Image (cartoon, rainbow, N blue to C red):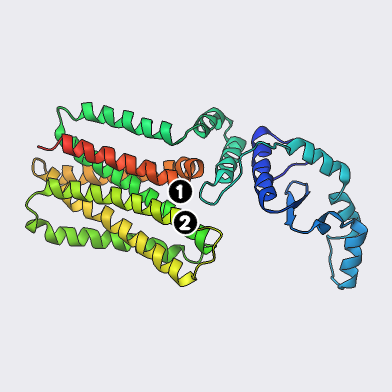
Amino acid sequence: MTGSLTYYSKELKELNACILNTLSRVFPNVFVIPGDINLILASPSADIFNSSPLTLCKKIADYDLKTNLITLPHLTYRLDQERRNWFNSSVKTPDMVINRDLVPEGLFLNIVYQNILFTPLLKRPLEFLRGINLLTASLSVIILFSLFFFLTRSRRKLAIPIAIGTTGLAAMIFELILLFGFQIFYGYIFYEVGILITAFLGGMALGAIIMTSGLKNIKNHAMALMLIEAGMILFVLFLFLVFSSLKVSSVYNPAMIHLLFIALLFVSGAIAGAEFPLANALYLEDSTVSKTVGLIYGADLLGGWAGGIVGGFILLPILGLLQGSILIAVLKAASLLLLICRRK
């Protein structure tokens, strides 16, 4: 963990305390070697407390290990008891929240620390965001869509780009939630991220192709768009059930996890991709091609940009995957209601 040999700010203290409290819930023995980078040892065995510099040097000699840095003076310096006592007194925060797989509090605390380190002006906004819960976030969505409701009274067609904007936001958050989830249940993501993103984009392309080819056979485009919005809500609720039923502590078949998340990413992309041809067809009825394409595509990009920021920095680190899914369901429900109310 990031540490310090001189001073622990409130943010750095909370970050370390969160991880230490989390480890203490699982391991009966936690031993910290403080420094600019804190080395944290966690074990069911109390032997980690009994390794003196001389004992460690003897073990290094017994195993005939050739080391340049790990010498008796270095170990004596790193394992200094006074420094460890200072660290424990500086970081001790028993009531600090713990980090969980589906609610990664440590991620948000690290975001706060890193951002305040380089941009101190972000301190108050980030502290404000930390107080957000599902209720306040849902109320914010309701207030926002109340404004959209009055904004679209005289311009009913604006409900279409608003719906596409929320779809771009939701699609980005779907992707983030599923990438987070894959890392949690599979164990690592870096070698797999290419095929996962490809599945999402492939689903989006296929959804758009199928809908484009079938537009002529759809008599009521507005109703079809609303049905896809409802389908997106059902998909979010299905994601909630998936993450609620999977147990983080269980070991799953890697092939099963691969197939499950590839399928979920593909389906989420297909649902989002199917909306764009319908939205373009609806808006094009009373507009030009250039204005329609520009507005719908711009709304999607704006929503995706907002989803990347809101999802990656706020929604998932603060609310977690389960409550984040519920909030997206609330967002899409508000978007569907707006479409229903503003349907010609």
Q: Secondary structure at mark 1?
A: helix
Residue found at x 70% / y 36%: 93
Camera-side residue: 307 or 258?
258
Report whether 268 appears left or right of 324.
Answer: left
Mark 1: few/some/many CA within 10 Å (<14, 14-19, 20+): many
Circle 2/circle 1 CB separation < 8 Å: yes
Residue 178 lies left or right of residue 202; in this view the side is right
Residue at figure coordinates x 20%, y 41% from the top left: 160
The picture places residue 148, in percent across and down from the top left corner, at 25, 30
Tag 2 residue: 181
Position of the C terminus, as image quadrant, is top left
Tell me the number on the disc at residue 321: 1
On screen, residue 309 versus residue 337, left or right, reads right
Label 2 secondary element: helix
Q: Amino acid at mark 1?
A: Leu
Q: Position of residue 340 (x, y in %)?
A: 17, 38
Horizontal side of 169 relative to 179 (left or right) equals left
Q: Is residue 48 above or below residue 225?
A: below
Specify whether residue 308 is in view: no
